[in-house]
Amino acid sequence: MTDWCPFAKRSEQKSAGPFTGGGHKIVHHSTDGPTPDGAIPTFAANHDWPHFLDAVVNGTYVVWQFVPLSQASSSLRHPAGSGETNHDNCIQIEHTGFAVSSSGWSPVYLQGIARLCRWIEQNFAVPCKAPFPFGGQGHLPARLDWAAWHAASGHLGHQHVPFNDHTDPGAMNIAAVLGGDHPHPPPPPHPPHATHPFPGVLKNGDRGPGVKELQHGLHDLPHGHYARLVPDGDFGAMTEVDVKQFQASHHLTVDGVVGPSTWAAIFPA
């Protein structure tokens, strides 16, 4: 693992100490301020430095790093007697901007965030996926409890973190972040079939060609959430997480079981 990002401006600050466990994850924040110049004094005054702060300055993506990847940062609340959120294998990024308007962040900004995230994923073993949806005011996902947070890996928002009440980064276009700036081109899509007949109900523990067809269907969806799903014909925990994420984003019953409605949504006629 490399502790310091080579394209970030390094400004080393006091860390929160070593990580103590948990799934490897990136936590996205937003500063709810217009410029990085306002954020940095706030971090210093509150002693809550994140790992990274980024912004678009004069049309160019810029990122600062304050804490090495091997150490925890301190931007999350951690009430006494609760799980220690900051130390739960999470790399924290503060994005300069407002949660209420994050759905409209520019392509330049999203591509820069994607580049930073690919580097973090490679150096901190974070999977390139968002196990829970990101939402704005009025459409916020349920906040995770400690067990779900501790087990989660991938990209999450401050809005997901237990014992916290912030809703940032709002409805940031996480699909663009997950799909952007991959160092290698994605594999060619699975050849389309003339039809995708429903193979019967599929669930965790199932194996076979129906499961593989399901995984190809998720993998080939255009928005990038499931680009790292490996179509191996084995319906395991990762496939179940992806199915639940798909169901949540399509207003289906979120049970991880692929019945006729979920199958039809993945393979519309």
Image (cartoon, rainbow, N blue to C red):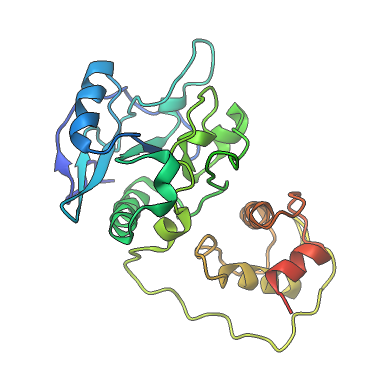
In depth, the one of 106 and 28 nearer the eye is: 106
Pick out the residue farthest to the right.
Answer: 200
- Residue 96 at what x, y percent from top left? 29, 40
- Residue 140 at what x, y percent from top left? 58, 39
Pick out the residue farthest to the bottom.
Answer: 194
Q: Residue at coordinates 21% horizontally, 45% vertically from top-left?
A: 63
In depth, the one of 12 and 165 nearer the eye is: 165
Task: Count the numbered circles shown.
Answer: 0
Q: Residue at coordinates 46% horizontally, 77% vertically from top-left?
A: 187
- Residue 235 at what x, y percent from top left? 70, 60
Pick out the residue farthest to the top.
Answer: 80
Q: Residue at coordinates 33% horizontally, 64% vertically from top-left?
A: 181
Q: Residue at coordinates 55% horizontally, 27% vertically from top-left?
A: 162
Up the image or down, 39 lies above or below 1; here it is above
Up the image or down, 98 lies above or below 38; here it is below
In depth, the one of 15 and 79 nearer the eye is: 79
Q: Is residue 150 visible?
A: yes
Q: Is residue 227 left or right of residue 214?
A: left
Quadrant for the C terminus in the image: bottom right
Q: Is residue 39 left or right of residue 99?
A: left
- Residue 123 at what x, y percent from top left? 32, 49
Q: Is residue 21 left or right of residue 59?
A: right
Q: Is residue 25 visible?
A: no
